[in-house]
Amino acid sequence: MSTGGVRKCILVCMILLSGICYKSYRPTGVQRMTVSLNGFYQNSFSSRSASNEKYKHSDRKSTHPPFVIRHVYPTGPESPPSLVTYGRDLPAYNDNYNIDTTTLLTSQITSPRKSKYEIIDLKNKYVTCDKIHVFIQARDDWNRPKQNGGDYFRARIYNDNLNASSSNNGDIIDHGNGTYSAYFTLPWTGLVNIEVTLMIPSEVIRIVKRIYHENPYRMVYEGKFQSGKKIKITKCHIHLDSSRLLCNFTDELSGQPWFCEKPKNLPCSSWIEHHGNPALTQKRTNELLLPGEEDAFQTKYIRRVLRRLQPLAIKVQSNEQLEGYHLCKAHLPFCRPRPSARNPGLSSAGGSRPTSSMTSGFYYRDVWHSNVCNARYLSTAAVQSCLRNKRLYFYGDSTLRQWYNFLLEYLPTLNNVTFYEHKSTYKVGPLTAEDPKNNFTSRFFHHGLPIRNTWMLVKNIQYEFNEIDKLRADKNTVVVLNMWAHFTGVTLDDYQSRLICVRNALTRLYQRSPETLVIIKSANTRSFAYTPTSTINFSDWYVMKLDAIMRDVMKDVPNIVIIDVWDMTNCHHTGSDVHPHDLVVREEIKMMLSYVCSSKRNGST
């Protein structure tokens, strides 16, 4: 055999051997599938794909503990490959990761001081329900028009004297050439002011995309392991970037993954507490920035209101000679579930909203007027009567806990009967309130991992889809869900796969109890600090993508309602906060009760 032939033979043997070694180190149950995420009915994990297919047609009783402990050990002298490498070639859900690595010059970043907006075809007279077109021109610090799109803007109209405000219709249109369009419907008489805010410039989003694509392990979570007086704390994550031995806490039935580094001299079964570590998250996120990128995260570029090319306070008259507000959408239906959650104005492609659709509502004197259904306030006595014999189950994060707490404070006969087993119970639950007079029960459970809160008991962390499977539901059962605030640290693949588990559980619930009402609270807008860590890990730009995936995955599930609180928080005068103001929560509760207490749903005429 020739020398060249020998070299080729050796090379082939080395490749085959390395492939065998690599395969032997991969933890079982987490092999990535190379399927396109646009076909989102396929899951990202092989074990999950098979089990979810089975769940679609089975009505199982879940008696398993929240986590099944498996040990993951390498079988050779080398360290196991980082989980971060698994499926790195998969693109994020419906996104473009053609990352431009051109050197970033801060003078080229979209400038909120130089960018301007104006009304197209400005008129001398407007009447209620007229539409206006706001045109945005992005410019850099040298006042040069931008030639590319990708900036993240938010917009609203408002009148502070009337405590009136509204978001734009549909999504702000990115024309791809540095210009954008926002459309509004004018629902009240009097002055209307326009506000456009540059939330994140395209250049910063480019950095965020690179980091998300290359580093799914950004948020730092830790597990506490204890046996007697011996305590060890190790790092945990879905995508754990570690060369150490791992404890595999993947949910056995769904395949939802979770891993922790195995502590020295302690078994995996000694895992007792979990928390998120913000200090280590900040340190890790800063380490992911390339030289010079931190300069783009300056306060002058992020969350800044744009200047106007012209005075944009227009006066609106009534076309019916009446002062006040006008519902521009005639014949609103009762607030009740549709055959599916596919609401008008929500497309099937990623949940984006066309500008032809109307915003989900508007505020006038701090009262939310829905454009979706005929929502109304109910007296305390009416709410108590409506909730008689009902059981409300809240599964979600702290923004949903606000709904639970609001009812607890609002209803005088509802009593807190929670057993506070741990200092974290008041945050993550389980929380229980009972009204013995009306036979009404309300319960709150935090959704399963990932969770960023302070130290909490592992035994109290339950996956929401498993809890839904345990419900003995009937027409008096109401399930309320939301999942977004703690998922900004996972990939869109992971979030979509998690929602598929929830969707399948809701489908099984519907098969067991077709009259059970399910309400999904959408994501809300939030504030975030002017730091790389906050902008990268908590920005609305990513939350908006999560919300779009939620709407897309859930759009065809029967008998559910999606309450759009994004518009409710985007435009309110108290500003955006991860925990909205009580004035906003009150209106969110009004929307929820309008569905729960619908006369059609309760059999009244």
Image (cartoon, rainbow, N blue to C red):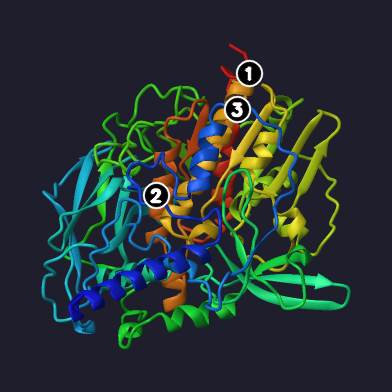
Visible residue check, residue 153? yes
Visible residue check, residue 571? no
> What residue would you read off at disc 2?
165
Closer to the camera in the image, 587 or 34: 34
Q: Please name the residue shown 32% across and 85% down the image.
A: 295
Mark 2, Cα crowd under 10 Å, few <14 / some 14-19 / many 20+, is many
> What residue would you read off at disc 1?
602
Q: Please name the residue shown 58% across and 70% down the image.
A: 74
Residue 116 falls left or right of residue 289: left
Dot 2 lies on which element? strand
Please state the horizontal and vertical placement of residue 298, each as a whole percent of the image. Answer: 35, 81
Q: Which mark is residue 58?
A: 3
Q: Please name the residue shown 15% across and 47% down the image.
A: 124
Q: Amino acid at mark 1?
A: Asn
Please state the horizontal and vertical placement of residue 442, each as a whole percent of the image. Answer: 74, 39
Measured in 3D between alpha carbons, the distance from the residue under mark 2 to the one under mark 3, in whole angstroms, is: 47 Å
Mark 3, Cα crowd under 10 Å, few <14 / some 14-19 / many 20+, is few
Among numbered discs 3 and 1, the one appearing first in the sequence: 3
Residue 481 falls left or right of residue 546: right
Measured in 3D between alpha carbons, the distance from the residue under mark 1 to the one under mark 2, in whole angstroms, is: 33 Å
The quarter holding residue 110 reads: bottom left
Say which quadrant the N terminus sits in: bottom left
| Residue ranking furthest to the bottom | 291
Query: Are dots 3 and 1 in contact, CB under 8 Å?
Result: no
Please state the horizontal and vertical placement of residue 406, each as a whole percent of the image. Answer: 68, 47
Dot 3 lies on which element? loop
Say which quadrant the C terminus sits in: top right
Q: Please name the residue shown 69% across and 30% down the image.
A: 383
